[in-house]
Every structure is written in structure tokens, then in C-alpha cells.
Amino acid sequence: AQKITQTQPGMFVQEKEAVTLDCTYDTSDPSYGLFWYKQPSSGEMIFLIYQGSYDQQNATEGRYSLNFQKARKSANLVISASQLGDSAMYFCAMREVTTGGGNKLTFGTGTQLKVEL
Amino acid sequence: KAGVTQTPRYLIKTRGQQVTLSCSPISGHRSVSWYQQTPGQGLQFLFEYFSETQRNKGNFPGRFSGRQFSNSRSEMNVSTLELGDSALYLCASSFSGTSGTGELFFGEGSRLTVL
């Protein structure tokens, strides 16, 4: 079975600083996808970034980048130049390969990020 | 381009009742999946529909069911509600076909409270 581990229940960062949120995963499948989502207190799950297991380069989306280290099975999210609006819960997730194909995500327990002035 | 739309956003039910939640995916997306989020269990996969067929199913009792219509809109139903069904129910849509690649986009969720 696939597993996602986020070891940081809470993180603090100063505004304008960069922060790294850790995520490690466990799978025996050669093909998988890794996601990061942001969930503010309103509850909406906001897509941030996606990395496919065969992608050669680390994914980037604006201030978000994914530090993908396949051999170490880690997929850390880096947020550059933190803003107060970045304060939220962040989830790492992995797409599970099923016999039926398709989309079944396994989520980590999340990291609560607080950006301070 | 409109995002994933879930209705209703909030609802309160009593034990034993049933509830139906609706999800309209992003235009052109054919895959719709459902997740339950609770403080104790975190985010758990319920099921996924693709082209009106259930493609994947999580470990939930038969009280939880769903369907997908020809326009890709999906509904999930929970019968005989229990207190433990109180949760945020999230719907996700994806363009992906059988390869299961690409991004998933979530709606704002339906927050169910069972009294």
C-alpha cells in the first residue's frame, strides 16, 4: 500500500522568507504522481503543484517548487517569499495506481503553516 | 473557466436521515472522485467515477454510494446517517483518462453535520 508521511505538524516562517515543507512517500509502483494542496480555513483544497514520477525536472509554479528526490522518495514543497496569505494547512498526496486506472489519492496528515510579520 | 462546484456548501441532518451531495466538474473533465475529511481520520478516498462508471472504490460501508451522469456531474449519497459521518466532503475533477495522469482540482466542499 502507498503511504505519505508529513513529519511537520506545524511550521512558522517570517514574511518574505522561504520555507520547505517535507513530504516522503512509499510505493513500489514505478509510475506515480505527487501533488501538493493548500487548504485554508474555509476548507477548499487548492491545487498548487504536480510532479510525475517520470518527469526529469522539478516542477515549479510561480512561488512554489517541488524538490523531487526520487531515490530518497521525497517530494518537498518550497515556498519562496512567503506571504501572510500563505498561512494554511498544506497536504502532500500521491496518486495510487489501481487496476482500473484513474485517480485515487493518498494524503499525508498535513502541515499547518503560519506566516508571521 | 469555471472550477469544480459543490452543492450544498453546508447542511445539517439528524441521525438516520439520508443526504445527497452534488458535484459539477470542470468543463471537459470526465473523472470525478470524492473524499471525506475528518479531524480524526484525515482525508480518505470514497470513490471515483469516469464516464458514468465507478472506476475505484475506497473502504467505506455500503451506506455511501454515488453515481455520475452523462454530463459528468456526480452525486454521492449517504443513507442512514451516523454521527461519525459528520465531515467535509470534497469532490475532485480531472481530465485524465485511463492513464491516470495530470492534475486533480477540488471544489470547496460540502460540510455535513449530523446531530
Image (cartoon, coloured by chain):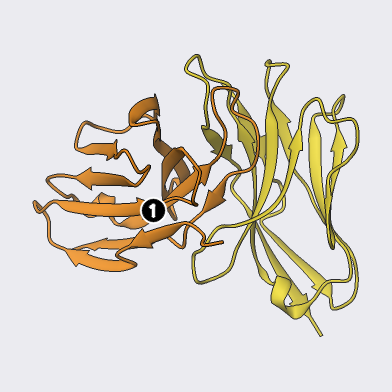
Above or below residue B56? Residue A79 is below
Res B109 → quadrant:
bottom left
Q: Quadrant of the C terminus of chain B?
A: bottom left
**Position in image of residue A69 (x %, y %):** 87, 33
What residue is rendered at 29% in x and 56% in y?
B86
Res A29 → quadrant:
top right
Above or below residue A15? Residue B41 is above
Which one is nearer the viewer's eye here, A75 or B56?
Answer: B56
Callout 1 amino acid = Ser
Residue to which mark 1 is pinned: B24
Would you say A23 lies left or right of B22 here? right
Which one is nearer the viewer's eye here, B89 or B27?
Answer: B27
What residue is rendered at 18% in x and 50% in y?
B82
| Chain assignment, label 1 | B
Would you say B93 lies left or right of A109 here? left
What residue is rendered at 52% in x and 27% in y?
A102
Res B35 → quadrant:
top left
- From the rendered image, report the letter of the chain displayed in yellow: A
**Position in image of residue B42 (x %, y %):** 48, 48
